[in-house]
Image (cartoon, rainbow, N blue to C red):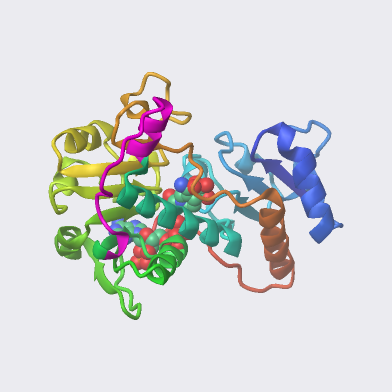
Amino acid sequence: MILVVKSGGEQALPEWRASFAEVAPDLDVRWWDDATVDPAAVDYALVWDPEPGRLAALPRLRAIFGSGAGVDAILRDQHLPKHLPLVRCVPPEATQRMGEFVCWAVLSLSKDARRMAIAQAKCAWDAFDPPFAAAAKTVGIMGLGAMGQRAVAMLRGLGIPVIGWSRSRKTIEGVECFAGPRGLPAFLARSEVLVCLLPATPETVGLIAAPLLGQLPPGAGLVQVGRGAHQVLPDIVAALDAGQLSGAMLDVFETEPLPSDNPAWTHPRITVTPHAASLPSRHERARYIADCIARFERGEALPNLYLPERGY
Ligand code: NDP
Ligand code: OXD
């Protein structure tokens, strides 16, 4: 069986091969552009952002594996073979890392870690009262899927009150859950720190903009770990400058890497992280994908499937 890989650049191939060799020794793992691979012999593809039309040119392809949890970069391919299963990469280590990151981000806002980093860069002893105690503010999580629910559980473990919003209403013990466009205003009005863990879909693109930010309690915090397409960055900067937002932790951007002249880099109330919220190791992802392939070969159901009718 042949798996072609386009994730992490060709320099990542040896690590992918070594990782798969441990968990699926019979799998022949090849780079996406390997000219010695017969396209008609490829069974599986593991991709982050395949060039449009390339997957459709693999006639024997049986399943597509995203190398991340969000598959929006794969869906940009107009020729994507839609009849094939598309599996999102959600090993348990990915949700754990995301939960850790969200907790770190919320705690960073509660301590104003950005202010401390700025002071340290100037060797300045800037003693100040922390802006808030994390457990005294309600965190609103947009997106209660694999990532969002793990973040909920880990925040609650720290004693932080959490509410959630999703497309369909969820029941999570101890967490007030809101759903759909009608539930959004009530959810936002209570979210003193807003965390975005949504997929990028036509419904969610551009959501984090002035109209939404204006519905948050004044001085709210923002943790953006979804996709850059969710946000209108100038609106976030304007909300920070006006005091409507007190701080923002931004991990994802419309253009990545974030250009060096982007004002977010130097804004005193924005922490920029390089799309680093949850990146499971290649070994962890290979184990998950090998397990999926083994299930698929046995005719069993695949986990974390992209569902075209939902768009994520
Ligand atoms: P899931 O598909 O498991 O969950 C998505 C959640 O978003 C669901 O709760 C879903 O609602 C909700 N949702 C989708 N559309 C809407 C909508 N229009 N209105 C309200 N809620 C909506 O995805 P994951 O949790 O695995 O991942 C979520 C996203 O996190 C990824 O798509 C990606 O964008 C981002 N991500 C970012 C990473 C990073 O490093 N920064 C790493 C990994 C993921 P419902 O429950 O009703 O289906
Ligand atoms: C993902 C990501 O979707 O890293 O997994 O953004």
Q: On the picture, is 288 further left or further right than 86?
A: right
- Along the line of sight, which residue is nearer the eye, 44 or 112? 112
**In the picture, which quadrant includes the C terminus?**
bottom left
Which residues, given as a range, are shown in magenta? Answer: 114-135
Q: How many labels, in total?
A: 0
Q: Residue furthest top?
A: 261
Residue 236 visible in the picture: yes
Please state if 102 lies on the left or on the right of 299 as rendered.
left
Ligand 1 quadrant in view: bottom left
The answer to whether residue 24 shows anywhere in this view is: no
Residue 91: percent from left, percent from top: 60, 61
* Residue positioned 68% across, 58% down in the render: 289
Q: Is residue 119 above or below residue 165?
A: above
Q: In this picture, is 20 found above or below 171?
A: above
**Is 141 situated above or below 46?**
below
Q: In the orientation shown, which residue stands out farthest toward the right?
A: 26
Task: Report if residue 120 lies within the magenta region.
Answer: yes
Tell me the residue at 49%/57% (across/down).
100
Residue 127 position in % (x across, y down):
30, 40
Residue that protrudes farthest toward the bottom in the picture: 173
Looking at the image, which residue is at 15% across and 43% down? 244
Quadrant containing the N terminus in the rendered view: bottom right
Give how far across and how far down residue 47 sits, in percent: 62, 44
Please name whichever residue, 282 or 243, is drawn nearer the observer in this view of the structure: 243
At which x and y percent is residue 306? 49, 58
Give yes or no for residue 37 being in the magenta stretch: no
Which residue lies at the image location 56% right of the left edge and 38% below the top edge? 49
